[in-house]
Image: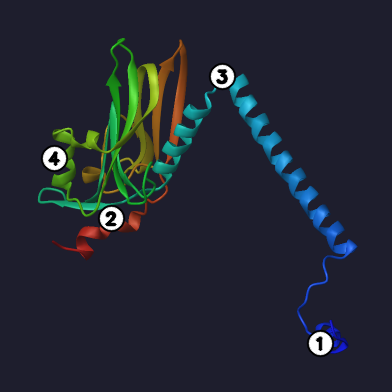
Amino acid sequence: MSSDTNRYLRRRPGISKGYTLIEVLVAMAIYMAMLMLAGTALNQGLAQYQGLVEKGIDFWDYAKKISLDKSFNSAIDYYVYTRSDQWFPYFKGESESVSYVSLAPFAGDLPVVVWIKSERQSNGKTAVVYYELPVYTKSYEDIEREESFGDYKKGKSMKVLENAESVEFRFYAYDFLTKKYEWVDRFKGSKKKLLPALVKISYMHNGEKSILNFRINVNSLVKMLYDERYPQ
């Protein structure tokens, strides 16, 4: 190689001469730190899982209850209309079931109509089953038809509880007559013009009573004027 070529290579910018010792040491330090953080996170996750197992809580049952909590927390006042009740937020709660509209589906990204129902098992005990269908722009009649004909079972579903007994749904809601919040066995958005503040599912399992409480966060008494602002 000529001396002119050597001079050109020395002057040419951007030619790598390899890594310095300091650069290698810094890279190794970063790599070791990442390994330590990953190991710590793994140990914490295993410890939490072991804690759940020791308490007798199945991991997947716990995950399903977390998903259900998210669904209730993301419930929305999806307004529908009937001639008798005019505009009202869709919500129907009974002692053995509840139905509402949520922005947090179990599967997918679209807002959904949710049905949660207690159903009799072949062994005589009760399962609590979650169903969902995309709400799109369904009317009140559309939702009622899907429930009446069992079409809600065509969507996604999951069993929240199995082998339970004495399952009961209750609803903590504001009563405009008594001007206070109280627990009720039945709740209809068409009558109350708003959603309940809490939903409680109580049940017996292996001889022990358990309670699941779910909060709904979207209520506003200002929306009671919906009929006046948006006459049909």
**Crowding near the residue tagged with mark 2, few <14, some 14–19, many ≥20 C-alpha atoms within 10 Å:** some
- Which of marks 2 and 1 precedes in the sequence? 1
- The residue located at (38%, 39%) in the rendering is 181
Quarter of the image with the N terminus in it:
bottom right
Left/right placement of residue 41 relative to residue 178 reads: right
Q: In this view, does 55 lie above or below 89?
A: above
Give the labeled residue for mark 4: 145
Tell me if I can see residue 95 in this picture: no
Q: Is residue 191 above or below residue 94?
A: below
- Tag 4: residue type? Arg
Give the labeled residue for mark 3: 56
- Which of marks 1 and 4 precedes in the sequence? 1
C-alpha gap between disc 4 and disc 1: 82 Å
| Labels 4, 1: front one | 1
C-alpha gap between disc 3 and disc 1: 73 Å
Residue extending farthest front: 1
| Labels 2, 3: front one | 3
> Residue 8, labelled with which disc?
1
C-alpha gap between disc 4 and disc 2: 26 Å
Give the labeled residue for mark 2: 224
Which image quadrant is residue 127 in? top left
Label 3 secondary element: loop
**Crowding near the residue tagged with mark 1, few <14, some 14–19, many ≥20 C-alpha atoms within 10 Å:** few
Label 4 secondary element: helix
- Tag 3: residue type? Gly
